[in-house]
Amino acid sequence: MGIIEAILLTVITAATPLVLASLGELVTERSGVLNLGVEGMMVMGAVLAFAATQATGSPYIGILAGIACGALFSLLFGFLTLTLVANQVATGLALTILGLGVSGQIGEPYVGMSGIKLQPIVIPLLADIPFLGPLLFKQDLIFYLSIALVFGVNWFLFKSRAGLKLRAIGDSHGSAHALGIHVIRTRYLAVMFGGACAGLAGAQLSLVYTPQWVENMSAGRGWIALALVVFASWRPWRLLAGGYLFGAVSISQLHAQALGIGIPSQFLSALPYAATVIVLILISHNRRMTLINTPASLGKPFVPDR
Amino acid sequence: MKKIILALATSAAVLGFAAAASAQDKTKICFIYVGSKTDGGWTQAHDIGRQALQTEFGDKIETPFLENVPEGPDAERAIERMARSGCALVFTTSFGFMDATIKVAEKFPDVKFEHATGFKSAANVGTYNSRFYEGRYIQGLIAAKMSQKGVAGYIASFPIPEVVMGINAFVHGAQSINPDFKVKVIWANTWFDPGKEADAAKALIDQGVDILTQHTDTTAPMQVAAERGIKAFGQASDMIKAGPETQLTAIVDTWGAYYIKRTKDVLDGTWKPEPVWDGLKDGILTMAPYTNMPDDVKKLAEEAEAKIRSGELHPFTGPIKKQDGSDWLADGAVSDDGTLLGMNFYIAGVDDQLPK
């Protein structure tokens, strides 16, 4: 295995949770809801996925548990912000803090246990392609899901009728409501999709990335996922590119350090963030594109007039 | 109305008296933790020490603790809360609590404080630390014997003297066996991020190291080493569970004996603030069992450990040159503690540039 291949394999593992969590948040935000609780939902998914895997011995049950846990946890956010019309920013922050605390409590007996790693699924024939085969077709289920979901979400948002409605709600919930679209119901579903994706990202952390449980193991990845959504200007393909760019820069800086080329490590550690900022500046140059893609009702409360 | 107020005041006084009485029965020894008590590393080691202390004195003491106290302004509030609650002695167990501890200590001259790994003291503030570098030196010896390629990977956290000292001790130990031994260093710039630590481990292994050591807090690097079939050293706690066939040994922080000793001093009224820097011989630091290595390497490690314990061997004994080629320690000279505690240079042979 060449060094480039080795680096790319590490990049894929590092980028997958970011892509998943931010993809879920992208759908949530496209419906006009800002959920800052990604970090909390992710870490809850991680602990439940780990616990379920330990209990059943099957990481696939773990994946399901992670997804279900993320979706259920996001329902709490949905109930508070959509039904009770609480402030979305404050509720999202509270969800993150709650998730970090509760997951620590649930996870206490699992600290220090060695986990069960989700094994790769080798796709016949394709896996034999030189270079690309081992990279793309000898991966675990969560990686395949992440790519499939990017395709799926892109199709859903821009090619399907339901996606059109969802985007309409995100742009102007008042008009959508007047047209008879179920604003609250759609937003609930979008919030739950976001939660499920964050939970799946969490499962990736505790089953693939580092098969173990430690408190606070998401270590800020939920926040990076949130930033990636803006970075991608709410477009799934850009999000995929952004996630992998971030992953690639983070991993390359580690290799640069190990090579001892003498660039200060603090500078290298800041590189992924710097790269993100630079791309953001380049993207936001086209103001019209940004305006078209930003959901206009993002973060605004909606109370149907009965 | 007056009656009610009087009744309230009386009951408050009685309650207050009762509280004071129970506080007198039990001495409160308090702990401030930077992380969660189940972090599997640094804070867990302190909590195991606290439990040992509680077991030792049983009913005579109480040992309340606060977890996940962030370093910075919040720390002061947390420490003050503890001091106000009637603690006799407060252990603040992270470097970043240093200034907060000193500030609170000024306000509570009757409460005694002990700050881990810091260097500021006062009339009622002592400091304590562990000579982790002794363990790192032994790890270096083992690494040089066990590595086929003569290259080890070192996952470091932040370029503070504590960590730099560890790298130097490791390198010096390894090069005393194999003068050409190389160490690749990655600064993770975090104490705690399993994903990033695992990525750093993968990067080092992909670049050809066949021994891994870490100065970060999670078992993620050990796990990666196990997966890739190389050997590794654990940090802060025994990490053998994460790599039963991988861990060579680990530096295990064993604060219990120290906490018991200092609590006894408080109970006897003989407590004095002093800068304590204990090592292997005092039992504040122990080596996890030497595993997954041939008997001759194990023997070498045990001999070195015995020599350090007896004081016969100091890991930083000259001749040692600095990385820039200038002399640091002459032949047979031993480093003083001050230089070690403020260490901001690499010794010759470290294949990295120290971040400034």
Image (cartoon, grey):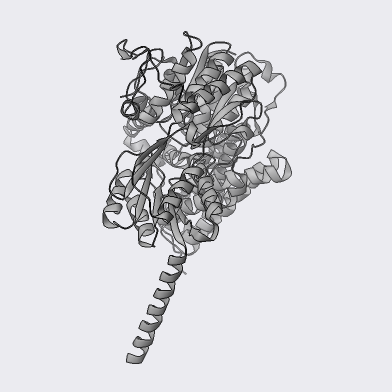
**Residue sitting at x 39%, y 62%:** B85
Residue B294 in view:
no
Q: Nearer the viewer, residue B134 or A214?
A: B134
Residue A113 percent location from the top left of the image:
63, 40
**Residue sitting at x 31%, y 58%:** B110
Q: Nearer the viewer, residue A45 or B15?
A: B15
Q: A299 left or right of A237? A: left
Q: Nearer the viewer, residue B185 or B123?
A: B123
Residue A61 percent location from the top left of the image:
70, 43
**Residue sitting at x 38%, y 62%:** B86
Residue B290 in view:
yes
Quadrant in which the C terminus of chain B appears: top left
Q: B299 left or right of B97? A: right
Residue B260 percent location from the top left of the image:
48, 48
Position of residue B64 relative to residue B130, above or below, is below
Position of residue B255 relative to residue B219, above or below, is below
Position of residue A171 relative to residue B192, above or below, is below
Q: B263 left or right of A208? A: left
**Residue sitting at x 34%, y 37%:** A288
Position of residue B178 relative to residue A300, above or below, is above
Residue B355 percent location from the top left of the image:
34, 23
Q: Nearer the viewer, residue B248 or A165?
A: B248
Quadrant in which the N terminus of chain B appears: bottom left
